[in-house]
Amino acid sequence: MTGKFIVIEGADGTGKSTQARLLVEYLRGRGLPVVEVREPGGTRVGESIRSILRNPAFRGMSPQAEMFLYMASRAQLVGEVINPALAGGKIVIADRFLLSTVAYQGAAGGLGVEIVQEIGRVATGGLRPSLTIVIDVNEKKWLLRKGFQRNGAQVGLFEEPPDREELKGLEFHKKVRDAYLEIARNDDLSVVVDGSGTPEQVHERIVKAVADALH
């Protein structure tokens, strides 16, 4: 029996981690076998890589170096956790997957969408999600959540010190959002979900999207 692989995606500040957790709780509450993973991370190798990628001290890291670190973490996660879980008939819920690297390093970082997708196919062994849910939040709400002003200045609303991704600035993150929307709308295994409203309202939309796509 082959399991299902569902990925929750979106730019920083869209609430994707909260929604991934709520979806896991929902599915487990219905007695389904669920494995929860996050990127980068999810393995000892991946968590070590995550600490490098999130460290503001490495702010000058090149997009190429970023991409290969993300891919290395992803390759380990697929081989060590995701593939065995799917082979065992489990549902894997991932907080980010390949589309994140395509949007951040490929589109916004300037490496190119196609080349990042091709390297990603090698890193993942060609694994594709059964469904990718992209949570989208309009610009005004996103600015408020991430502590940006419309002139691009940040006003320090982070719950924790900003990591490397959060320090890249407003224009970079606008490119990320545009890339997510364009790629998702041209992929028949992806769906864009409105991220406005309460977490519970967004969760209901995601549950409906999962049910529509997998049944």
Image (cartoon, rainbow, N blue to C red):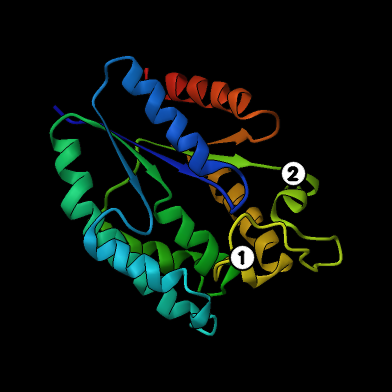
Task: Tell me which residue sits at (41%, 21%) in the image.
Answer: 26
Measured along the vertical axis of the image, is residue 34 above or below residue 166? above
**Which corner quadrant of the image does residue 177 belong to?**
bottom right
Residue plotted at (55% across, 50% down): 183
Question: Can residue 79 be seen at all in this image of the molecule?
Answer: yes
Residue 17 spot, x, y in % from top left: 49, 43
Rendered image: mark on residue 30: none
Tell me, yes or no, if residue 123 can be seen here: no
**From the viewer's perspective, is 117 left or right of 157?**
left
Residue farthest to the front, as pictured: 160
Instruction: Tell which circle, 1 or 2, labels the residue nearer the N-terminal end.
Output: 2
Q: Amino acid at mark 2?
A: Asn
Front residue of this view, candidates 87 and 142? 142
**Image quarter hosting the N terminus:** top left
Q: Secondary structure at mark 1?
A: helix
**Which residue carries the number 1 mark?**
166
Residue 205 at x, y percent in the picture: 57, 24
Question: Which x, y percent locates residue 164?
Answer: 55, 71
Placement of 97 over or under 101, stated as above or below? above
* Secondary element at image label 2: loop
Crowding at dot 2, Cα within 10 Å, few <14 / some 14-19 / many 20+, comes out as: few
Q: Which mark is residue 138?
A: 2
Query: Can you tell which of label 1 and label 2 is closer to the viewer?
Result: 1
